[in-house]
Amino acid sequence: MNYKKINFAKYSSIKIGPIINVAILDQCSDYSKEFHIIGGCNNILVGPNPPKLMMLSKKFNYIKIENNLLKIGGATPSGQIVSFCKKNNISNFEFLAHLPGKLGGLVFMNAGVKEYEIFNNLVEITTCSHKKKKCEIDFTYRKTDIKEPILEASFKIEKGFNSQRVLDLKKMRSNQPSDPSAGSCFKNPPQHFAGKLIEELKIKGIPYGSMEFSTQHANFLINKGDGQFKDAISLINKVQKEVYSQFNIKMELEIEILDKNYL
Ligand SMILES: Cc1cc2nc3c(=O)[nH]c(=O)nc-3n(C[C@H](O)[C@H](O)[C@H](O)COP(=O)(O)OP(=O)(O)OC[C@H]3O[C@@H](n4cnc5c(N)ncnc54)[C@H](O)[C@@H]3O)c2cc1C
């Protein structure tokens, strides 16, 4: 099996993490359950002691139209999907224009913006052991029950790329910080907004080392420079503890923390 040395302080969107060898999944025989699969690392905080990691090889970076379905490889970045859809006048993927990720990570997370979600047009996924139709997968807000690396997904094709939708969604993002982050840190608890609860704690903008909850959008944990894993964890713990003690609400993480000592 091949490995690739990845510097997570460069590769991950939050710009934190060690330099380690990541296994490359090129053939299904490379895969075993001991590996944790990663995509573009836009939703992951990697600690100094991560589990064994694996990523799909470049072979899984493709988009094609076959049998009137859009077939996308698990390693295909969101920007490439949008460009293909624009060129081929395909609708419903415009929301990916400002949503970073690779197809496998986007499907696993059921990523989306407002009413646009990757599962809306999904037909089936392919993993090493099976093909699974959408109706056989349990999915909800930013969550699925998929247990194996997603190698490919197929989608229904509807015509009509909507450039205005891309602009509208870009405008919606203007309140989000441009500093490195992993997107929204916590899920919105039922009937509440995570950002609003964090604002109530008066913690946003207070630095722990180079990490802080953004003054622009309180649910974004941002890295202002050489952010450290331990500072990110201290801030996350503080928010979870204080929101629980003040409002009796559990703040569930939307980002995933990969560290043996943290789990
Ligand atoms: C600035 C910013 C804004 C964001 N805004 C949004 C938003 O509006 N909406 C939204 O939904 N998300 C948003 N995110 C989060 C992120 O874009 C999504 O979660 C995206 O789906 C992550 O894709 P990824 O390839 O980077 O996956 P990763 O972060 O690498 O992994 C995420 C999860 O998917 C799993 N996974 C990755 N690849 C595979 C695979 N091939 N097979 C099976 N499982 C896999 C991983 O094990 C992990 O559990 C934002 C992130 C950033 C940095």
Image (cartoon, rainbow, N blue to C red):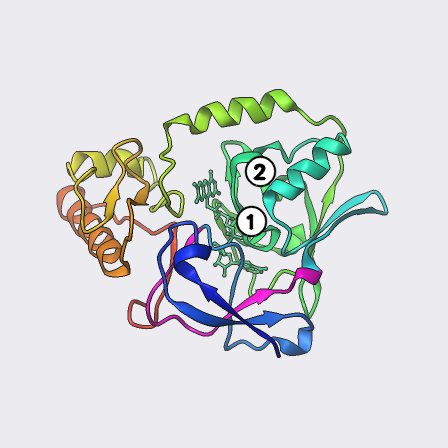
Q: Splitting the image into 4 quarters, where does residue 220 fall?
A: top left
Question: Can you say whether 47 is above or below 250 in the image?
Answer: below
Magenta span: 43-59
Question: Can you say whether 82 is above or below 20 in the image?
Answer: above
The stretch drawn in magenta includes residue 51: yes
| Disc 1: which residue | 106
Q: Splitting the image into 4 quarters, where does residue 69 fall?
A: top right
Query: What residue do we see at 71% from left, 35% from top?
Result: 85
Local crowd size for mark 1, using a 10 Å CA cut-off: few (<14), some (14–19), many (≥20): many
Question: Can you say whether 48 is above or below 135 in the image?
Answer: below
State yes or no: discs 2 and 1 in contact (Cβ < 8 Å): yes
Q: Secondary structure at mark 2?
A: helix
- Kindly report the distance in space between the C-alpha atoms of the residues bearing marks 2 and 1: 9 Å
Query: What residue do we see at 13% from left, 48% from top?
Result: 245
In the rendering, at what x and y percent does residue 247 appear?
A: 17, 41
Does ligand 1 reach within 8 Å of label 1's beta carbon?
A: yes
Of marks 2 and 1, which one's residue comes earlier in the chain?
A: 2
Q: Is residue 237 left or right of residue 172?
A: left
Instruction: State whether residue 245 appears in this view.
Output: yes
Q: Nearer the viewer, residue 165 or 122?
A: 165
The numbered dot on residue 43 is none
In the rendering, at what x and y percent does residue 111 appear?
A: 52, 44
In the rendering, at what x and y percent does residue 178 appear?
A: 38, 36
In the rendering, at what x and y percent does residue 216 appear?
A: 29, 31
| Disc 2: which residue | 96
Amino acid type indicated by mark 2? Leu
Query: What residue do we see at 39% from left, 58% from top?
Result: 9
Q: Quadrant of the N terminus?
A: bottom right
Q: Is residue 84 left or right of residue 170?
A: right
Q: Is residue 207 left or right of residue 127?
A: left
Question: Can you say whether 9 is above or below 30 in the image?
Answer: above
